[in-house]
Amino acid sequence: MSQPKTLKKRIENRVARTKKTDVFLPRDFADLSGEDQVLRALRSLVKDGSLMRLGYGVYARAMRSRISGRPIISSSNGFHSAALQALTKLGVAWEQSDSTKAYNEGRSTQIPVNPTVKVKRRFNRRLSDGRTELRVER
C-alpha cells in the first residue's frame, strides 16, 4: 500500500517535471491546496535548497553549488534569465535596457554588468537572489 504524498512532495515533483520555465509563482500550485499550505510548502522547499526566493511570491529552481554548497539559481543564464522569466510570468511588459541594446547591436564594447530592464508600466517589486538585484528603468 502506497503512502499519500505530502503537498511538499507534490510541489517538488511538479517543479522537477516542468521544463519550460525555471520560475514559479504560488498560483502555479493553487490546484494542489490552499494558499497558506502552498506558501508553507514553498518556504520549506526554500529552506531545503531546492527553490530560491527571488522576491514577493516569486521562486526559482535552485541547485547546490559545487564550490560553496549554497543554493544557486539553476537557470541557463543565471539570475538575469530567471528575473526576465519572472517579469514575463507576472505579466509585466519589459524590454532590454539601452546599454544592453547598444552592446547587442555592436554600438558599444562595454558589457552591462548589472541586469537592467525597462518596464513599460508601474512595477514596484524587488527581484534579487541575495547578491544581485534586478535594476528597473522607466
Image (spheres, rainbow, N blue to C red):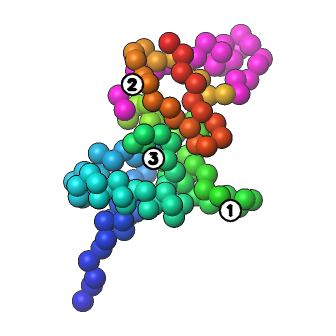
The residues bearing labels 1 and 2 have C-alpha atoms spaced at a distance of 33 Å
Residue type at mark 3: give it: Tyr
Q: Which mark is residue 69?
A: 1
> Which residue lies at the image location 74% right of the left edge and 59% below the top edge?
67
Q: Is residue 133 left or right of residue 56?
A: right
> Which residue lies at the image location 65% right of the left edge and 41% below the top edge?
131
Q: Is residue 102 left or right of residue 91?
A: right
Q: Where residue 58 sits: x, y (%)?
A: 43, 42
The residues bearing labels 3 and 2 have C-alpha atoms spaced at a distance of 16 Å
Question: Earlier along the polypeptide chain: callout 3 or callout 1?
Answer: 3
Q: Is residue 98 left or right of residue 95?
A: right
Q: Quadrant of residue 122?
A: top left
Q: Where residue 47 sits: x, y (%)?
A: 51, 61
> Which stretch is magenta?
90-113
The residues bearing labels 3 and 1 have C-alpha atoms spaced at a distance of 19 Å
Question: Earlier along the polypeptide chain: callout 3 or callout 2?
Answer: 3
Q: Quadrant of residue 101?
A: top right
The answer, for residue 77, to whether it is visible in the render is no
Residue bearing the label numbered 3: 59
Q: Residues within 10 Å of mark 1 (few under 14, many from 20)?
A: few
61 lies above or below 118: below
Q: Secondary structure at mark 1?
A: loop
Q: Where residue 60 sits: x, y (%)?
A: 48, 47
Residue type at mark 2: give it: Val
Residue bearing the label numbered 2: 92
Q: Secondary structure at mark 3?
A: strand
Q: Is residue 8 magenta?
A: no
Residue type at mark 1: give it: Gly
Q: Quadrant of residue 130?
A: top right
